[in-house]
Amino acid sequence: MRKGAAIVLSVLGAFLVLVAIMAQFYAPDRLMKTPLDVKTVTRLDGTAELADGEGGTNSFPVRATSITYADSELSDDKVVSFASSQCLFKDEGEVDQCVSAQDSEDRLISAETDNFATDRKTGESVNDPKYVPPGSVAHAGVVNKWPFEAEQIDYPYWDGMVGDAVTATFDRTEMVEDMEVNVYTIEVSDVPAEVTADTPGTYSSSKEVWIEPLTGQIVNQVDHQERYTADGDPFLILDLGFTDEQVQDNYEEISDTVASLTLIKDTVPLVGLVVGLPLLLLGLFLGYRNSRAKENA
């Protein structure tokens, strides 16, 4: 009976310790990667001042939709390839995700597409042509997420208007409900740019991005942009941010991911060691005592 108990305790304890070691050192490396089945629709709203053709502007409420999905055929275990589209339009009438360039009410402000690839752990851009379609623009820095276990440091961040990475400066931490996030600020001032197709001018931006650090995912984002023509006339002045509903959706989705990763990364190793190690030692002790008792019999 004692021999059977010793074996059971030893095996169970060893199993729990092994699970703890696997969860601590192996599972996070496999799980803390950008999934290959990403498909997100991000909604933003705000206001825009648009050039009126006479050196002034007209103001409109606006909405924007960003659709991003992973291309599994161009992705692999280390790198994920993304296709993305962005649409900015006047918030007039019933519009779901975008309007066409031939919209009879002239509600479309801009529509763009982008293809890029990132490292599945660090979020950094990868420009190997095997991961993106021919003709894709080379990217730099992080694009649509920060690395897993993001630090309170500065990161290079891709700005499509600049055509290069700019500095995302760690500014502070904040709470989004019960979730602590890192807030990064990005400042761009009077950079030469095409304010729209074939129209040179200058571009300025002041952006804040809220990042959940364990997952590196964006919880919220606000942006103030100013685009001026080469003559100094305003072309577009834009204030845009995630809708309240989008922030709430992001919070709920990211909270679930954080809970899963925390369970595997922290809780399972702790329980495995706290429970498994004593069971293993007790089983070994009982086994040793049983063998000694047999020798002395």
Image (cartoon, grey):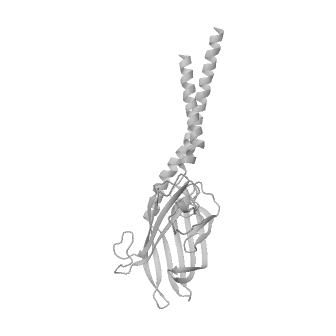
Nearest to the observer: residue 160 or residue 273:
160
Nearest to the observer: residue 219 or residue 89:
89
- Horizontal side, residue 92 vs residue 10: left or right: left
Q: Looking at the picture, does residue 266 appear above or below residue 185?
A: above
- Horizontal side, residue 289 vs residue 242: left or right: right
Q: Looking at the picture, does residue 83 appear above or below residue 13?
A: below
* Residue farthest top in this picture: 297
Residue 130 x, y percent position in the rendering = 53, 60
| Image quadrant occupied by the C terminus | top right
- x 60%, y 43%: residue: 25
Please indicate, yes or no, whether residue 201 appears anywhere in the rendered image: yes
Residue 117 x, y percent position in the rendering = 54, 61
Nearest to the observer: residue 221 or residue 74:
74
Residue 239 x, y percent position in the rendering = 50, 75
- x 46%, y 74%: residue: 46
Residue 182 x, y percent position in the rendering = 58, 60
